[in-house]
Image (cartoon, helix red, strand yellow):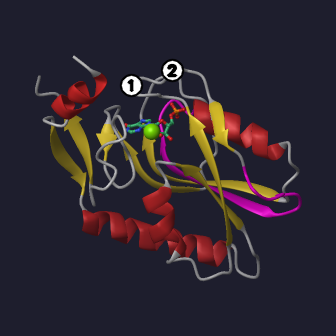
């Protein structure tokens, strides 16, 4: 079967809702309020990790009342699979210097924590004034890389989720909710 045919076939899998649109919006409001309170008088750089974080950051930034600037990094660790390849590769680097800036990394989901661990080290080496992490989802997986998450949305079980920016093989990112992908084949 060619790659496109196999992708279409996979779209027949069904999705079980884990966090509805309303629940997500409430959590994003909470996180935005906490960030606005903690960064009062500051001008942080929000660094979103693409592609998965694009919807989360778009909603979150509109709930942040302090002035922020944006930069984006893209990393690839999974390829087309549901299992991490274990190799983190920067496919798009930051556009600006973050030296002496307050940096807030915005992540969609932390699975093994390998990607974030790599990113934090990489960003630390550029001498920011501070680094904090905001992650919408934190997966309960054994042997996780340790990361200090200042702003966390939800802890989730060790299952593959899609929607609200998260993909399976680049699909499902536009779902307004987050759900489990169920194998029907
Ligand atoms: P980690 O390096 O194992 O923590 O993987 C982090 C990245 O893998 C996330 O930023 C996502 O892009 C992707 N990822 C991990 N788990 C899932 C999932 O359940 N659904 C979709 N993408 C995931
Ligand atoms: Mg992904």
Based on the picture, tell me whether residue 99 belongs to the magenta stretch: yes
Quadrant containing the N terminus is top left
Where on the picture, by quarter, is residue 106?
Answer: bottom right
Depth check: 27 or 4 in front?
A: 4
List the residue tagged with mark 2: 85
Residue stretch in magenta: 94-113
Question: Marks 1/2: CA distance?
Answer: 8 Å
Q: Where is residue 114 in the image (x, y as percent from the top left)?
A: 59, 30
Where on the picture, by quarter, is residue 181?
Answer: top left
Q: Is mark 1 within 8 Å of ligand 2?
A: no
Based on the picture, tell me whether residue 15 belongs to the magenta stretch: no
Up/down of 56 relative to 25, above or below: above
Taking the image as shown, residue 6 lies to the left or right of residue 108, namely left
Q: Position of residue 146 (x, y in %)?
A: 62, 34
Q: Could you tell me which residue is drawn at 38 percent across and 46 percent down?
A: 166
Q: Where is residue 85 in the image (x, y as percent from the top left)?
A: 51, 20
Pointer 1 with pointer 2, Cβ within 8 A = yes
List the residue tagged with mark 1: 81
Depth check: 142 or 81 in front?
A: 81
Quadrant containing the C terminus is top left
Up/down of 109 relative to 21, above or below: above
Q: Could you tell me which residue is drawn at 16 percent across and 29 percent down?
A: 9
Up/down of 37 relative to 87, above or below: below
Up/down of 49 relative to 99, above or below: above
Residue most extreme to the top? 1
Q: Could you tell me which residue is drawn at 54 percent across and 29 percent down?
A: 77
Q: Could you tell me which residue is drawn at 58 percent across and 49 percent down?
A: 49
User: Badge 1: few (under 14), some or many (20 or more) residues near its Cα, within 10 Å?
Assistant: few
């Amino acid at each position: 079967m060619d790659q496109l045919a196999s992708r279409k076939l996979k779209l027949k899998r069904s999705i079980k809702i884990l966090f509805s649109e309303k629940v997500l919006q409430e959590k994003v409001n909470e996180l935005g309020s906490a960030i606005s309170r903690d960064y009062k008088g500051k001008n942080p750089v929000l660094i979103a990790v693409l592609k998965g974080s694009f919807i989360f950051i778009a909603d979150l930034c509109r709930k942040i009342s302090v002035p922020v600037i944006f930069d984006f990094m893209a990393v690839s660790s999974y390829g087309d699979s549901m299992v991490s390849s274990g190799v983190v590769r920067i496919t798009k680097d930051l556009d600006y210097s973050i030296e002496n800036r307050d940096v807030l990394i915005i992540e969609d989901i932390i699975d093994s924590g390998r990607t974030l661990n790599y990113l934090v080290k990489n960003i630390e080496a550029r001498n920011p004034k501070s680094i904090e992490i905001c992650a919408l989802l934190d997966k309960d997986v054994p042997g996780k890389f340790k990361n200090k998450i200042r702003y966390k949305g939800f802890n989730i079980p060790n299952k593959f989720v899609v929607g609200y920016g998260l993909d399976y093989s680049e699909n499902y990112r536009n779902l307004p909710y987050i759900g489990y992908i169920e194998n029907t084949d």
